[in-house]
Amino acid sequence: MRPAVIRLAVNRFAVRRAVLAALLGAGTVAASAEPYAASGQVGYLQEWELKATLAKTASGSRVEYAGPMTLTHVGLCSVNGVEEKSGSMRVTVSRSTTVEGTLTMEGDTCRLVAARAQPYSGLLTCRNGQGVPVSFSIEQERATAPEPPAVAR
């Protein structure tokens, strides 16, 4: 083969790879456009309410959820009002028997390991606490229809 023909064959191969990568990437973006919500409880007495808005991405046999999260203290001993901790949640569901992830808040990152069946139930390992119970579910958010305009009388 002449050098010009070799270069043309290599360039065609590179273009095919780029188009294939772009198409595969578009599928991942479409999957992540679906909004999901996580809700549950954290703590020995389930004194923290967990709420998160998550984006879903799928890759092979793994599904990952990630997004902003808020923990709200709902226990009776909230003397100084409601306490909230904001951060992020990342959860990976694979073919294994466990769900793994992290809850990241200011000053701490907690490792999450839970059973694979919903509601996910397991333990958090944080800087200031080992074996903290956690239970949560992840569901696709339902689109809410806008309310009809009020009729003036």
Image (tube, rainbow, N blue to C red):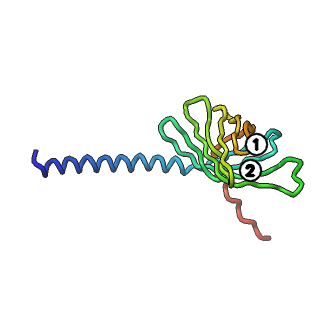
Left or right, residue 104 beside residue 133: left
Q: Which residue is mark 2?
A: 71
Assign the C terminus to one quadrant of the image.
bottom right
Q: Is residue 141 visible?
A: no
Q: Residue at x 71, y 40 (%)?
A: 136
Q: Nearer the viewer, residue 40 or 101?
A: 101
For numbered disc 2, what is the local secondary structure?
strand
Question: Which residue occupies the extreme bottom position in the image?
Answer: 153
Q: Are marks 1 and 2 in contact (CB under 8 Å)?
A: yes
Q: Residue 93: x, y in percent?
A: 58, 37
| Relative height, residue 37 to residue 81 (above, below) | above
Q: Which residue is mark 1?
A: 42
Question: What amino acid is found at the position of numbered circle 2 in the picture?
Answer: Leu
Q: Residue at x 39, y 48 (%)?
A: 23
For numbered disc 1, what is the local secondary structure?
strand
Residue 68 image label: none
Q: Residue 21: x, y in percent?
A: 37, 47
Q: Residue at x 65, y 41 (%)?
A: 111
Sequence-wise first label, 1 or 2: 1
Question: What amino acid is found at the position of numbered circle 1 in the picture?
Answer: Val
In whole angstroms, how far apart are the C-alphas of marks 1 and 2? Answer: 8 Å
Q: Residue at x 70, y 35 (%)?
A: 122
